[in-house]
C-alpha cells in the first residue's frame, strides 16, 4: 500500500492535482478580488475537475489501450460551457455581464486539461496572458473607450429627455 502511495506515478498525479488547484485558485482570486460572481472556489474546482477527468482519461488509455482521452476533454469543454452560460446575464439596462467571468472559468478548465495531460508548462504562459488580458488590456480598454462610454450615456440621457418632452 505504501509503495503505491510513494510511487512516481502517484506522486506525479498528486502534483498535477495540486497544480491544477493552485492555477484555478489564482485565477479565482483575481476575479474575487474585484467582486465577480465566480471566485476562488469555483475556479479552483473547475480547474481541478477538468484535470481529474484528463488524468483518468490518460490512465484509462494507458491501462486498456483503446480509450480516447480527447473525448473526455471535449465533454469537459461542453460541460463548462453550460456552467458559464449560467454566469452570463443581461441586465435591465440591456448590458451584458459575466462574460469575462465565464471566459475565466473556461480558461481554468482548459488549464486543468493541460495539467492533466502533462502539458503543465502551457499553464505558465497562459497564466501570464490571463494577467495581461485582465489587468493591462482592461486598463487600456477603460481609458481608450472612456469617451465612447460617456457619449453613450449622454445619448441615452438625451433620448430620455426628449421622451419626457413629448409626453408633457
Image (cartoon, rainbow, N blue to C red):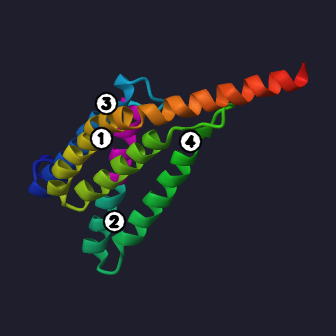
Residue 134 lies within the magenta run? no
Location of mark 4 (residue): 88
Range drawn in magenta = 40-51
Examine the rendered structure and indicate whether residue 60 appears above or below residue 104: below
Q: Nearer the viewer, mark 2 or mark 3?
A: 3
In three-dimensional space, the C-alpha distance between marks 1 and 2, rounded to whole angstroms, equals 36 Å
Are the residues tagged 3 and 1 within 8 Å (C-beta)?
no
Are the residues tagged 1 and 2 within 8 Å (C-beta)?
no
The answer to whether residue 85 of the structure is visible from this angle is yes
Query: In the rendered structure, which disc, 4 or 3, sits on the residue that comes first in sequence?
Result: 3
Mark 3 crowdedness (10 Å alpha carbons): few <14, some 14-19, many ≥20: some
Residue 30 badge: 3
In three-dimensional space, the C-alpha distance between marks 2 and 4, rounded to whole angstroms, equals 30 Å
Query: In the rendered structure, which disc, 2 or 4, sits on the residue that comes first in sequence?
Result: 2
At which x and y percent is residue 30? 31, 30
In the rendered view of the protein, which quadrant contains the C terminus?
top right
Q: Quadrant of residue 64?
A: bottom left
Judge from the rendering whether residue 63 lies leftward or rightward of residue 90; answer left or right.
Answer: left
Location of mark 2 (residue): 57
Judge from the rendering whether residue 67 lies leftward or rightward of residue 117; answer left or right.
Answer: right
Location of mark 1 (residue): 137
Q: Secondary structure at mark 4?
A: loop
In three-dimensional space, the C-alpha distance between marks 3 and 1, rounded to whole angstroms, equals 15 Å
Amino acid at each position: 500500500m505504501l509503495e503505491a502511495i510513494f510511487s512516481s506515478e502517484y506522486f506525479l498525479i498528486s502534483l498535477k492535482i495540486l497544480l491544477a488547484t493552485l492555477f484555478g485558485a489564482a485565477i479565482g482570486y483575481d476575479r474575487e478580488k474585484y467582486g465577480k460572481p465566480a471566485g476562488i472556489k469555483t475556479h479552483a474546482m473547475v480547474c481541478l475537475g477538468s484535470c481529474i477527468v484528463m488524468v483518468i482519461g490518460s490512465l484509462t488509455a494507458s491501462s486498456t489501450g483503446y480509450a480516447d482521452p480527447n473525448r473526455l476533454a471535449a465533454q469537459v469543454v461542453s460541460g463548462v460551457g453550460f456552467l458559464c452560460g449560467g454566469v452570463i446575464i443581461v441586465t435591465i439596462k440591456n448590458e451584458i455581464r459575466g462574460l469575462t467571468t465565464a471566459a475565466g472559468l473556461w480558461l481554468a478548465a482548459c488549464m486543468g486539461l493541460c495539467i492533466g495531460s502533462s502539458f503543465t508548462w502551457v499553464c505558465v504562459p497562459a497564466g501570464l496572458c490571463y494577467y495581461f488580458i485582465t489587468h493591462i488590456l482592461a486598463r487600456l480598454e477603460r481609458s481608450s473607450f472612456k469617451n465612447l462610454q460617456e457619449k453613450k450615456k449622454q445619448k441615452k440621457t438625451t433620448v430620455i429627455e426628449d421622451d419626457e418632452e413629448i409626453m408633457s
